[in-house]
Image (tube, grey):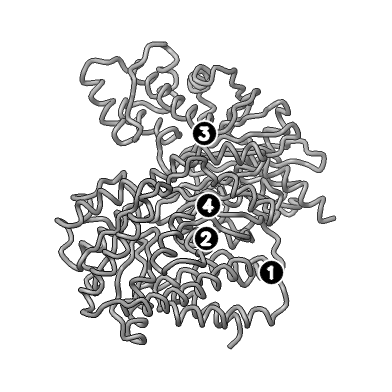
Amino acid sequence: MKAAELIQALSDAGRTPKQTILRSIQESGKRPVGCFPIYLPEEIIYAAGLLPVGLWGGKTSMTEVDRYIQGFCCSIMRADMELALRGAYNFLEAIVIPTYCDSMKSLLANWGIAVKTPKTLAYIIPQNRYSSGSLDFILYQNEALRTSLSEITGRPITEADLEDAFQLYEQYRAAMRRFVAMVNDYPVSLNPVNRHLVMKAAWFMDKKVYTEKLNTLMDALLKEPKETETGPRVIPTGLMVEPVKLLEAFRENHFVFVEDDLAQESRQFRTPSRTTGTVMEKLAYRLMDLRGDTFFYEENKSRGSRLIEAVKQHKADGVVVCMYKFCDPEEFDYPIYKKELEEAHVPILYLEIDPQMDSVEQLRTRIQSFAEMLNK
Amino acid sequence: MFLGIDIGSSSSKTVLIDREGAILGSEVVNIGTGTNGVDLALDRLLKKTNVQKERILYRVVTGYGRMTYQEADKQITEISCHAKGVAALYPKARTIVDIGGQDAKAIQLDANGAVENFIMNEKCAAGTGRFFEVMARVLNCNLEELANLAATTTEYVPISSICTVFAESEVISQLAGGASLAAVARGAHVSVAKRVCGLVKRIRVRPDVVMTGGVALNQAMANCLSQELELPVVVLESPQTVGALGAAIFAKECYEKKL
C-alpha cells in the first residue's frame, strides 16, 4: 500500500473511536478497559490480556452530567461522565480513573454514586514524586491495579506477562517518537489533521497491531520524496488539539506541528524508560521522571525552558497554547511559561478551546492572524 | 482602484482607494454577514465615487464574513487589516482596541505598524457591541440614545455580572430598585470598559492607544475606556471603516507585488 492509503486508514481509525474499538475487540478477542486521561500504566492492563482504550471525552450534548459536575469544570471530565451516564461505556469491562487534578478527584468521588457500570478502578497519583516514599506509593498502586485486573480476568498477571507488555509498549513508544520527528520531513502528508488522527488511533487499537501499522506507514513514507510546507512551524502545548475542525484551520493555513507538548500526544511517550529494575519499577520511574508536565508538581517548573529549547532545536516560529475549558492546572501553568516565552521572544498563539463548540470561526481568525503576523 | 471590504457580524463596510493610496470613498451598511449588506455597501460606494466595477484592479475582503464572500481576490483577517488601516492613518499607534458587534480585540503594533501580538475576547457577548444592544433594549432606547444618556452623568450603577444574559436580569433589578436610566446606561459603559480593559492588559498596553470598530463611534465608551486604561484613547475620524481601509491598502500592495 502507498503511504497515503496507510495514513488514510489510520486517520479513519482515529476519527471513529467506537467503531475502531469494536473492530479491535473483534480482531484481538480481548475485553476492553477504558483509560481516563492522563497517564496510566497501560502495560499492566495489556499484560492482563485486556485491551486498554483511551477515554478523552468527545462531542456530546450535556443533559445528564450537570447533576454531578458543574458547567465550569473540566470539559473532558464532563464529557466522559455524560457518556458514562448515557451508557456509552457499558461495553467496557472496567474503567480506570486516575487522580491527576482536582476535577478528577471530585469526579472519582461522585462516580461511584452516578455510574453503576462498568466496574471502576481508582489509580491514585502521589502529590510528591521525589520523596523516598513516592516509589513505594506508585508501586503499591501498580500492584493494586494488577490485583484488580486479575480478579476481572480470573488469572494472575505473571512477571513474564508484564515483561512482554513492557517490551511491546517500548516499541510502540519508540515508533511514536519516530513518527513525531518525521513530520518535519513530510509536513504535507503529515499535516496537523493527519498527524493527530494517526496518533489518536493508537488509543483505540491493540498496541501490537497499531505499532506494526505505524511502522509500515513510516517505512512507506520514507520511500517518497521529502516535502516542504509554507506555513508557520509551531509547537502546540496543552492537553490536546481537537476538534478536527480546529486542526483543519491549521492545515488550511499550512501550519507544521514540528513537535508537540500535548498530554494526549508526546507527553505520553517522550520520557525514556529506565533500563534497570523490575517492570513495575520502570513504570513507576517513568511517572517520576516525567518533567515539564502540568499535572505533576515540579519545584522549578521546566515547561517554559523545554518549550524554548524545542523552538530553538526545530527553528520553530512560535508556540500554540491549546487551553481547554476549564482546565485549572493548565490555566495556572500558563502565566509562568508565557513569561518565559515572551522573555525569549517566542511568539505565542493562545487558543481557548471548548470541545463542544460547533463553530471554530473565531479560532480560525486567530490562527490565520497568527500566520499573517509571522508573515507566512 | 483598489477595494477593501469588511464584512462584520452587524455591519458591512467598503473603502475604495486609488493607485496613490488616496481614499476615494467609503460606505457603511448596518447589516452584516449572511445578509445583502455587502452588496448594498459596494453598490452605494460605486455610485458615490462614480467608479465602474470593472476598474477595480484588486479586492481584499476581511471580517467575520470573509470566508463566505466569493468575489474577492484574497481574504485577510480583520486583525491584520485593522493594523494596516490604523498604521496608515495614525502611525504613532502602538495599541489598537477594536470593539465590534460580537467580538473585541487588542492588537499590539511595532514601530513599523506591523502586528506584534494580538488577543481576542472569548466566545461571549460581554465586552462587545452586542452587550450595548441588549442594554438599549432593556432601557427602551436606541444605541445613540444609550450613549447620550451615559454621557449625562458620571454616577453609575455597577453591573457585576460578566454574562450578558445575567447582566440583563441585573439591570432590570436595578431599574426596579429605582436606579436612574442614566446611571444604568453609564453602568453598562463602565462594565464594557472594565471587561475590555482586562482583555487589553493581557497584552502589553503601550501608547498611543487607538480605538476602532463600530463601538468607537460611542464617545462615552471611549471616555470610559480611557479612564479604565488610565491612558488617552484616540478615536479616528471613521473608526468603523478602518478595517476596510486596511483591506484596500492590502489590495493595492498585493496588486503591486503581482506586477
- State the CA–CA distance, disc 4 to disc 2: 16 Å
Q: Are marks 4 and 2 on the same chain?
A: yes
Q: Which residue is mark 3?
A: B99
Image depth: mark 3 or mark 4 in front: 4
Task: Answer whether labels 3 and 1 touch (C-beta < 8 Å).
Answer: no
Which residue is depicted at the point 36% across and 87% down?
A27
Q: Which residue is mark 1?
A: A185
- State the CA–CA distance, disc 2 to disc 1: 23 Å
Image depth: mark 2 or mark 1 in front: 2
Q: Which residue is mark 4?
A: A237
Which residue is depicted at the point 67% across and 45% down?
A373
Q: Are marks 3 and 1 on the same chain?
A: no
Q: Which residue is mark 2?
A: A271
Q: Regarding mark 4 in the picture, which secondary structure is present there?
A: strand
Image depth: mark 4 or mark 2 in front: 2
**What type is the residue that disc 4 sits on?**
Thr
**What type is the residue that disc 1 sits on?**
Asp
- State the CA–CA distance, disc 3 to disc 4: 29 Å
Q: Is residue B33 above or below residue A270?
A: above
- State the CA–CA distance, disc 2 to disc 3: 45 Å
Question: Which one is in front, A196 or A304?
Answer: A304
The numbered mark 2 sits on a residue in which chain? Answer: A
- If the image is split into quadrants, where does the N terminus of chain A sit? bottom right
Which is nearer the N-term, disc 4 or disc 2?
Answer: 4
Q: Are marks 3 and 4 on the same chain?
A: no
Residue B55 falls left or right of residue A140: right
